[in-house]
Amino acid sequence: MTQLPRTPLPHTLEKSLAAQKDEAVALATPEPAYDVRHPLYLGEWPKSVPYMHHDIARDDMDEPHLKRKHAILDKYPEVKQLYGVEWRTKYITIALVSLQVALAYTFGAGYLRDAHWGWMVAAAYVVGGTVTGIYGVLIHECAHNLAFKTPLFNRMLGLIVNIGIVFPIASSFRRYHLEHHTFQGVHGKDPDLPLDAEWKLIKGNKFLKFLWVFCYPFLYVFRGAAMMKSPQTWELINWAWTISTDLAVFNYCGPRGLLYLFLSLWFGYGFHPAAAHFIQEHYTFEPGQETYSYYGSLNVPFMNIGLHNEHHDFTKIAWSKLPALRATAPEFYNELAYHTSWVRVIYDFIMKDDLGPQSRLGRQFEDHLAGRATIKAARKAKRD
């Protein structure tokens, strides 16, 4: 089991004093229960284990985040004050894109153009992979319109981030990531779910799991392509933009400079601590819980990307305010299982026999809709 320090969950035998205090407060301040999972919205399903189960885990209810959001707002309406854009995001973007382009020039046409290739590979992993991991956070913030109030400016900033990434991912990420939020775990609609071929082939094999992590940048793109959707206008614009910027990098920084950016992307989204959040977020380390947060020191350089339960609950809160959300409603988050080490996440995922690409939760669209209907009815009853 990965490092998941937490206050005991409701089904455990022992409860800490803090948990008992939270329960007393909850009893003193009744809240609407939108379904039987209230207040933490944990499920009853067992996690899927390679070689023991022949499919990913299944749930017959909707994803938990919308209902937990309303439960938190019922108790802490002041959370809405955290909504809004973060002004620093655009400046971080400019600084990091400039850094990567400068390094591409340094290794491709500048001072280190004749240096041993090993230095470039090392820099691509240590510096480029780290920066590319932060690029992912920046693109993510733009996808949720949290860098500017105007969606157009967020799309344009996403294209600027994409200068440092040799593949056109900003616009496609925006499209598919928003679908992931709307249809979390829904078969055929959530592009974040692994393809059946992934988990059926890999199962719990350690070497294949290592290759899966190493090749994750390819798989991440391939899942979206496998949905066979026609590209939207902004995706076509993204393609044209990225081809143009790649040609510019090739022209001014040389092929080695472009290779540096490619390796940075591959490392940053693959076998790198920064990429562990792809596993941390929704791979089921515990039965009944489908989303996990990471509470460790790397949230500082990586702009709180580890606070994933908080983000799914409140997509209108920018990266800088997510810790304040957790501090405002601690009983809704501290009782959930969470990670404290991204390195440990990767290690456990590869080395533990009960974890693999099939360690996910799926649901049918009809069950998702039925769950959503219950919250609509509850909200209507509350208004009436």
Image (tube, helix red, strand yellow):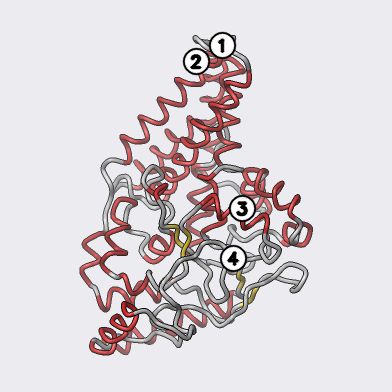
Q: Name the side, left or right, on which 378 lies relative to 212.
A: left
Disc 2 element: helix
The amino acid on which the numbered mark 1 sits, given as a three-letter code, is Arg
Q: Quadrant of residue 157?
A: top left
Q: Disc 1 to disc 3, how far (Cα)?
A: 35 Å
- Residue 299 x %, y %: 39, 49
Q: Is residue 247 above or below residue 329?
A: above
Disc 3 element: helix
Question: Which quadrant is home to the C terminus?
Answer: bottom left
Q: Residue at x 32, y 89 (%)?
A: 381
Q: CB atoms at circles 2 and 3 under 8 Å apart?
A: no
Q: Which is closer to the viewer, label 4 or label 1?
A: 4
Residue 16, disc:
none
Give the mark nearer the N terminus: 4 vs 3.
4
Give the mark nearer the N terminus: 4 vs 1.
4
Q: Which residue is mark 2?
A: 106
Disc 4 element: loop
Q: Is residue 83 above or below residue 106?
A: below
Q: Which residue is mark 4?
A: 1
Give the mark nearer the N terminus: 2 vs 4.
4
Q: Which residue is mark 1?
A: 113
Q: Which is closer to the viewer, label 1 or label 3?
A: 3
Give the mark nearer the N terminus: 1 vs 2.
2
Disc 1 element: loop
Q: Is residue 185 above or below residue 93?
A: below
Give the mark nearer the N terminus: 1 vs 3.
1
Q: Quadrant of residue 206?
A: bottom right
Give the mark nearer the N terminus: 2 vs 3.
2
Q: Which residue is mark 3?
A: 347
The amino acid on which the numbered mark 2 sits, given as a three-letter code, is Thr
Q: CB atoms at circles 1 and 2 under 8 Å apart?
A: yes
Q: Disc 4 to disc 1, how far (Cα)?
A: 45 Å
